Amino acid sequence: MRNAVLAISCLLLLSGCSGSDKVVNPPPGVGVWASLESGIPLYGVWGASATNVFAVGEGGTVRHYDGAAWTGVAVPTSVDLFGVWGTSASNMFVVGNAGTILRYNGTAWTTMVSGSTADFNRVWGASGTNVFAVAGDGSIVHYNGTSWSAMTSGVTSPLNGLWGASGTDVFAVGSTGTILHYNGTAWTAMTSGTTVVLYGIWGSSGTDVYATGNTGTLLHYNGTSWSAVTSGTTQALWGIWGTSASNIFAAGLNGTILRYDGTSWSPMTSGTTETFYDVWGASGSDVFAVGSAGVIGHYNGTAWSVQTHGISENLNRVWGPSASDVFVVGGPVAAGAGTILHYNGTAWSAMTSGSTLVLDGVWGTSGSDVFAVGESGSILHYNGTAWAPMVSGTTQNLNDVWGTSGSDVFAVGAAGTIVHYNGTAWSAMTSGTTQILYGAWGTSASDAFAVGDAGTILHYNGTAWSAQTSGATTTLYAVWGAAANNVFAVGGSGTLLRYNGTSWSGTASGTTQDLFHVWGTSGSDVFAVGASGTILHSGGGSWVAMASRTIQDLYGVWGSSGSNVYAVGAPTQILHYTGP
């Protein structure tokens, strides 16, 4: 299942899929990063109750639902996670790539020794001491309450789904119509009557079992043999779950959800075209389906609604006047649209930008005086009620915005563009360069910096912009400082520069990943974010890598304090840091 899921996910997200690097738990007393919102695919869902539901996905993503909202959970891995199952809220198993098996005791997550390097797709158990996991190489492992051990499956093709009526009546499904059965002693092959890939399996009993697969395939087992069932769809069906023999849900490609009432299968309106990979419920009127681009659908017994929207947008910058008033800007990976998200202290919601252009920078003086800049010279202003376009006087892409007040604002962009707002109108400034400028920041109206391509650093003294010697040749993406004599600039290949008020010098970052943004609360509390989930922190001395729990690129960082920090990136990635 892993290869098929990742192939589809790459297409849906229009972003590169890559391997994952394992990260370690932070030491005691150190804050942690967790995903708040994400366009990252979710592959598995299970819950102990209606107010204790978990969803797992790409890059070590784990999300938890408390009955009111979904929040990110930090776990000790960044590999893709595909399956989740448990016996209670304090005894849960999660499986994923590279032999990863995590266990949750209700308080903490630990990594178990699986004895395998296979990519696990699903996990299920009859009890906490009788648990099975199936993998992409056809292998099956078993947990007896003490340790995991390998079982003989008899196949080497991928196994995608797993379910049992008891510990001596377990089914596994996979590629080319594979169905295996375990009788408590050995796994044996069953005749499925199909050669299509099978993804999901669930039953109300050992004599009433359903399997789902490609091209709308639905099979039924009556305790004796498997037979084809008319699903009424040609869409691939990935997940299946139910409460009884007459109340079963199957979910799959393009938002497909089917329901079985004991007589026939009929389509339901899901409210999304994203692909669902798994489905689970606390009851027949409290069902969850998870899938591509982080979509989570919920059924309340009457209709399906989307709890988190599956969108694959890059989020480029984050800024806010307070912890309960935060703005994020960005846009889709492909087609243009001016994405603006807002956090009110409780939840994130999309704002109407009125723009079809990707937005790259955001800054303001208050929650009712916010500027956003982006493609083709677009500048938007928010007055606390609505966003409205401004006349920038340029068609160049604008990458960042910063100011000292609502009547002294700078925006920088392509071809050395710098425009200035005096509270009435925007006007062009002479930058003295044609290099692309990516970042801007300053301490006052007569002390501002702009950074960009080829190590470009410009300084504004209140009268004119002039070039400074950076000592770098790589692209510089962002600049921020704690004071006029303590300024940081970050850029390509881990470049990290520091300005002491007189000159710029290089600082060891400890990474070769591109660094896209930098922000801090003081010179002894600075964060830098970048490619492949890179997050660095400096406490005033050396830079230390933090466990971000993601492999996605991060483009912006900002916080209301050193213990309340947000990092944003692709796709639709919002990470939140809570300090010790």
Image (cartoon, grey):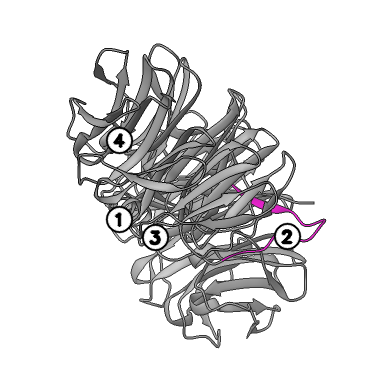
In the rendered image, the residue lying farthest to the bottom is 471
User: What amino acid does circle 2 point to?
Assistant: Pro
Residue identifier under label 3: 137
Residue identifier under label 1: 7
Report the magenta residues as a range.
Answer: 22-35
User: What amino acid does circle 4 point to?
Assistant: Thr
Of labels 4 and 1, earlier in sequence is 1
Which class describes the residues within 10 Å of circle 2: few (<14), some (14-19), or many (20+)? few
Query: How far apart, in angstroms, are the residues tagged by discs 4 and 1?
Result: 19 Å
Q: Secondary structure at mark 1?
A: helix
Q: Nearer the viewer, residue 295 or 327?
A: 295
Cβ atoms at labels 3 and 4 below 8 Å apart: no
Cβ atoms at labels 2 and 3 below 8 Å apart: no
Residue identifier under label 4: 212
Query: How far apart, in angstroms, are the residues tagged by discs 1 and 2?
Result: 32 Å
The relative height of residue 471 versus residue 541 in the rendered view (above or below) is below
Residue identifier under label 2: 26
- Residue 135 at x, y = what percent? 44, 54
User: What amino acid does circle 3 point to?
Assistant: Asp
Q: Nearer the viewer, mark 2 or mark 3?
A: 3
Say left or right for 160 vs 512: left
Q: Nearer the viewer, residue 258 or 564?
A: 258
Q: Secondary structure at mark 2?
A: loop
